[in-house]
Amino acid sequence: MSMFSITVPASTANLGPGFDSAGLALNLYLTLHVEKSEQWEFVHQSVHLPPASKASDHLIYQTAEKTANIYHSQLSPCKVIVESDIPLARGLGSSASAIIAGIELANHVCELSLSIEEKLRIATDIEGHPDNVAASLYGGLVITSQLPSGEIEVFQKNDTNLDFIVYIPVVELKTEDARKVLPEQFTRNEAAKASAVANVMFSAFVSGNYELAGRLMQEDLFHEPYRSSLIPNYAEIREEAKIAGAYGTVISGAGPTMISITSSGKGMEVAEHLEKLLPSHKVNVLKLDTNGSRVNLDAVKHNSK
């Protein structure tokens, strides 16, 4: 097995009313440099990553091993150097990108030749829902539905005419904590109203009516009303981003990061306006990643520091 690398984009999920079904791939990346070794070893090279754990405790390895076991294959030991632009526990799909990376690792090392549909099914089983993992796998805007049969239907749209501004606070928010504040169930009337908002929002997104999409993003009834109190400066960010020219602003995934959409080229203006008001946040302008996860078989040797 020659050296290779794996690149997986970050993601934002929900986009407001698209709860647990919609995601966008963003141009922050998790990158693995892989080479054959006598034993499994992970080396972390990023301020966003904690010290590397032993292989058996590493999410990427656990995912790779599970994938190999599904297909009755044996993982050959590797040294894996991990780099990441994706902050942990901020609502930018760090765990989803690690899961996709683990599947890609097993797919290449074990020569499984998995289809993208098989990769998505494995990732969804591990993650619990397909929104973030589908975006990191496919790239672009991805809307998914897992049917009662277990089959996952996917709609994908690539559009480079948007900027995405993320507001990343210093605090972390675990997804499980953000889920605890959500209601266990909705009445039929509540579900109908929330679904109607999502239907119009996605129709606007797909048709390119981003002003309408932005307005409907901010009318979510599934999760944002319950999570808003957990998000630092939630109301201020939404209001000031709108003043600066954003179409709409929502919680990124489970939070605490928030994300705005605006027309291409407008993002820096919005970011500069918000940076002055949010000294405790890191404000970045991002673009849509349209490639999804990818494996580079011609990786140049990467020396660990």
Image (cartoon, grey):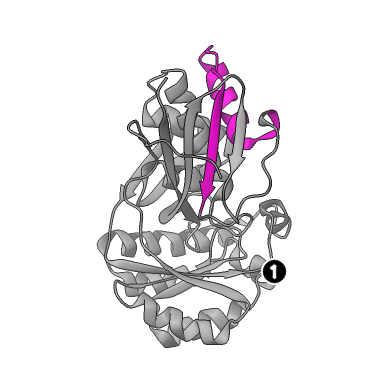
Q: Residue at x 65, y 68 (%)?
A: 170
Q: Quadrant of residue 114?
A: top left
Count of residue discs: 1
Q: Residues within 10 Å of mark 1 (few under 14, many from 20)?
A: some
Q: Residue at x 46, y 18 (%)?
A: 110
Q: Quadrant of residue 190?
A: bottom right
Residue 127 visible? yes
Residue 121 visible? no
- From the viewer's side, name the closer residue of 48 and 231: 48
SS for tag 1? Answer: helix
Instruction: Indicate whether residue 63 is drawn in magenta.
Output: yes
Q: Position of residue 83 (x, y in %)?
A: 52, 47
Q: Position of residue 58 (x, y in %)?
A: 65, 35
Q: Residue at x 39, y 30 (%)?
A: 117
The boundaries of the magenta stretch are 56-84
- From the viewer's side, name the closer residue of 107 and 202: 107
Q: Quadrant of the N terminus?
A: top left
Side of 232 where 2 appears, left or right: left
Reply above or below: 61 against 168: above
Q: Position of residue 131 (x, y in %)?
A: 49, 47
Instruction: Indicate whether residue 255 is drawn in magenta.
Output: no
Q: Residue furthest top?
A: 72
- The amino acid type of the residue labelled 1 equals Leu
- From the viewer's side, name the closer residue of 225 and 123: 123
- From the viewer's side, name the closer residue of 17 and 63: 63
Reply above or below: 205 against 262: above
Q: Which residue is mark 1?
A: 230
Q: Quadrant of the C terminus?
A: top right
Q: Position of residue 301 (x, y in %)?
A: 41, 35
Side of 157 where 145 appears, left or right: right
